[in-house]
Amino acid sequence: MRFAKRLDQVPPYLFAELERKIAAKRREGVDVISLGIGDPDLPTPEHVVRAARDALARAQRVAR
């Protein structure tokens, strides 16, 4: 199958490019925190919600 030449003019998908760069840095041993798009169709994992709730509660106690 051959693709139309005009597809060569379509820029690369931004987040795919970012994921490639992140993967390259990780292979170099760099600890990367990805703030990419994630999985917006999935709920936030419960352990993350719990950790955020606990951190906010601690911050409120300290602020008083």
Image: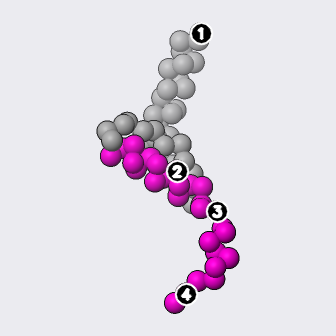
* Front label number (1 vs 4): 4
* Label ID, residue 64: 1
Q: Nearer the viewer, residue 51 or 8?
A: 8
Taking the image as shown, residue 31 lies to the left or right of residue 44, namely left
* Amino acid tagged 4: Arg
Which residues, given as a range, are shown in magenta? 1-27
Observer-side mark, 4 or 2, equals: 4
**Earlier along the polypeptide chain: callout 3 or callout 1?**
3
- As for residue 7 lying within the magenta part, the answer is yes
Q: Secondary structure at mark 3?
A: loop
Q: Residues within 10 Å of mark 4 (few under 14, many from 20)?
A: few
The residue carrying mark 4 is: 2
Q: Is residue 52 above or below residue 62?
A: below
Q: What is the spatial separation of the Cα atoms under label 2 and label 3, in whole angstroms?
A: 13 Å
Dot 2 or dot 3, earlier in sequence: 3
Visible residue check, residue 38? no
Mark 3 or 1: the one toward you: 3
Q: Position of residue 10 (x, y in %)?
A: 66, 67
Q: Which mark is residue 32?
A: none
The residue at the point 37 percent across, 36 percent down is: 31
Q: Amino acid at mark 1?
A: Arg
According to the picture, the residue beneath numbered tag 3 turns out to be 11
**Vertically, is 9 above or below 43?**
below
**4 or 2: tag closer to the N-terminus:** 4
C-alpha separation, residue under disc 2 versus residue under disc 1:
41 Å
Gap between marks 3 and 1, in whole Å? Answer: 52 Å
